[in-house]
Image (tube, rainbow, N blue to C red):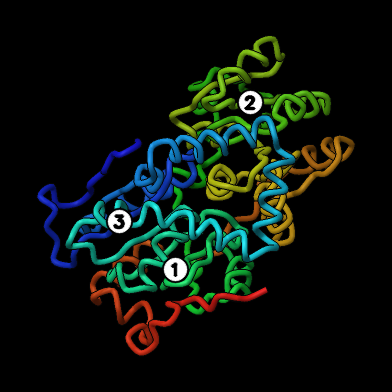
Amino acid sequence: MTGHRDRAGDPEGRSGGGRVVVVSADIGAGHDDAAVELAGRLAADGIVAEHLNFLAALPRPLHALVREGYRAMLSWLPRGYDALFTITDRSPLTVTAVRAGLRLAAQRTLRRLPPDTRLVVTTFPLANQLLGPLRHRGQLTAPVMTYVTDFVVHPTWMSPGIDVYCVIHDVAHQQATARGARDVRVVGPLVSTRFAPAPTAHRRAARARFGLPEQDRLALIVAGAWGVGEVTHTAEEVLATGCVTPVVVCGRNDVLRRRLHTFPGHVLGWVDDMPTLMRAVDVVVENAGGLTCQQSLASGRPTVTYRPIPGHGRANARVLAEAGLTTYVTTPAHLRPVLTALTATDDAPSLVAADDMTAVVAEAVQHGAHACLLDRIAADNSGGAFRERKG
């Protein structure tokens, strides 16, 4: 979707409250899917929303470097990604350096924002490192709100000039506050309503849809749109438990799908109807704590985190387990008892009801994007809703 704009709402771009610009990035699917879901909800409420790809504002070589470099690190240099995640978590100077480098795209980004922009909502952390400082310096007059797509609030999400931080769990609220955010809202995840618990009677039809056995206990193994991580080992170890039949989703990773060609379980590539697939299985095994994990929780499926990817995957795994939302299995020996127990019950934890993200955005637009955000913006524009921590 590089350089593409999705406009939702009035086809002529008119709205009594102005336009909301949702900024994401085509890295994996989580950031974009959250943005698309938000834009769709806003359109249903009659609010004009425009979806921009942040990476498309970068110089073309840098766009490719960020996107493909990230994919390569996750696939081939996971320890390198883990080190980068840790360094940026512990050293504010590294985040400051990233922020400085992104200034190259400042004017190009500003030109891509429509003149009637009333509010900017980001779903990608690096977008905050560019848009936040622009807001802080007064070059961007529209307030900036961010929706944190992970359960963990990494420092790359934090930036001076961001007016409101929207997170999906109280633990993330505590982290954002500890990192200096002043206005933090706990909202429901931006997951389609199609991912809702369904009656057990729907399971038979869902299994028939994907050609899955009607009577087996099924474990859905997911690894995001890119199919990254130790998926082959996970599939083999889940199969070895003998208590479930694995259903592996490889996403857009054709190499992984070919590697699992002879695997005795069920191997799928890209799945367009994930809500139905979620209804077909008994338990979900995931490795990142991102969008698919949120979809699983919304579907009411017991969820296991196993062999999480480095960096945000491991960080999310710890938070999810501490919050009682997933079961973090750290050794193959524990897989069988955990999967046996989870597939023997219909009870599964879910995210506690919180503010609706659409309502938070709609309120901001309806009130001129001031009263419902920060009453103190006009009085204190020194750092937006963020106090940058030193050292």
Furthest toward the right, the residue is 333
* Residues packed near mark 1 inside 10 Å, few (<14), some (14 to 19) or many (20 plus): some
Q: Amino acid at mark 2?
A: Val
Q: Residue at x 39, y 73 (%)?
A: 136
Q: Amino acid at mark 1?
A: Asp
Which residue is disc 2 drawn over?
248
Q: How many marks?
A: 3
Which residue is disc 3 drawn over?
107
Determine the CA span between mark 2 and mark 1.
34 Å
Q: Residue at x 67, y 43 (%)?
A: 81
Q: In the figure, residue 265 lies in which quadrant? A: top right
Give the percent coordinates (x, y) of residue 385.
46, 77
The answer to whether residue 224 is above or below residue 345 is above
Q: Amino acid at mark 3?
A: Gln
Q: Is residue 193 visible?
A: no
Determine the CA span between mark 3 and mark 1.
34 Å
Which residue is disc 1 drawn over?
355
Q: Residue at x 42, y 82 (%)?
A: 382
Q: Could you tell which of marks 3 and 2 lies nearer the N-terminus?
A: 3
Furthest toward the top, the residue is 262
Give the percent coordinates (x, y) of residue 386.
50, 76
| Quadrant placement of the C terminus | bottom right
